[in-house]
Image (cartoon, grey):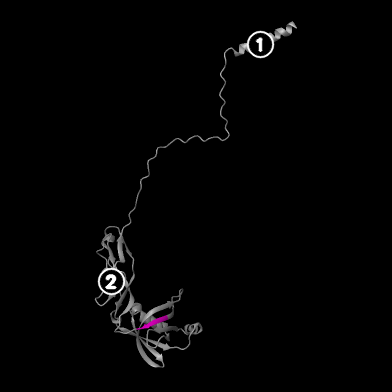
Amino acid sequence: MAEVLLKGQIRTGLGKGAAKKLRQQRMIPAVVYGGSAGQVPVTINPLELAKVLGTGAGENVLISLLLVGDGERTIPVILKDLQRDPVRGEPLHADFLEISMKRRIRVQVPIQLTGEPIGVRNKGGFMEQHLREVSIECLPGAIPKQITVEVTDLDVGDSVHVRDLPVPEDVRVVDDPARAVVSVLILRAVVEEAPVTVEEKPAEPEVVGKKEAKPAEPEVAGKKEAKEGREGKKEAGKAEG
């Protein structure tokens, strides 16, 4: 991977006030870590940094950082972190790591899928990408721009795992080998038949407070005649008296 040149001015002003003043001048604060001199605060032109990151290698681009201040020296670095404005997306602060071209480093590399799975094209499945970048270890000059995965032959139920990623021999993947990168799945609609029920006649609602009908007394034969006989005797007695 080719290196690109970026200029950094060594700065002495530190703190939020100094950083704010730099941004007003359309510059951003940055820090270089990992070198023998310890942390080195610098000032970077964000427009020049954007050009460096737009070279095609992304944030893993190798940078020859020209430090200007107490003399000049050039050191190899990679971008470790870039803080951006959450609204405008403009760079606010950058962290660089000084590296050795002869020592392996660990970086994140994006995963690029290519092709259309047969399970999607012919069987109504859908493709789900579980992992969009992977951690690798290699020499700085061997950092790949991306890892390309061909998915054309994937059928429904097939997956590509980390262990299946096509990487050069001098690149070691450090993520879990069993972790899924991409899968082809299918949605299965489950249709349950409603149980057949016999329509029942609704029961009459109970009327609250309704009194039960009192059963009629059975008529006693001869009861009426006996009563009339007693009343007749009473009338005869009154007449005699």
User: Which of 147 and 103 lies nearest the eye of the viewer?
Assistant: 103
Q: Residues within 10 Å of mark 2 (few under 14, many from 20)?
A: some
User: Which of 147 and 134 lies nearest the eye of the viewer?
Assistant: 134
Q: Quadrant of residue 45?
A: bottom left
Cα distance between the residues tagged 2 and 1: 123 Å
Q: Is residue 165 above or below residue 104?
A: above
User: Which of 167 and 43 lies nearest the eye of the viewer?
Assistant: 167
What stretch of residues is rendered in magenta? Answer: 94-98
Q: Is residue 173 left or right of residue 95?
A: left
Q: Are marks 2 and 1 in contact (CB under 8 Å)?
A: no
Q: Quadrant of residue 196?
A: top left
Question: Tag 1: residue type?
Answer: Arg
Q: For the point 73% across and 9% down, which residue is it? A: 238
Residue 176: % across, % down: 31, 69
Question: Tag 2: residue type?
Answer: Thr
Q: Is residue 100 magenta?
A: no
- Most distant residue in the right direction: 241
Q: Residues within 10 Å of mark 1 (few under 14, many from 20)?
A: few
- Closer to the chain start, of discs 2 and 1, is 2
Q: Quadrant of residue 141?
A: bottom left
Q: Secondary structure at mark 1?
A: helix
Q: Is residue 86 above or below residue 27?
A: above
Q: Which residue is mark 2?
A: 148
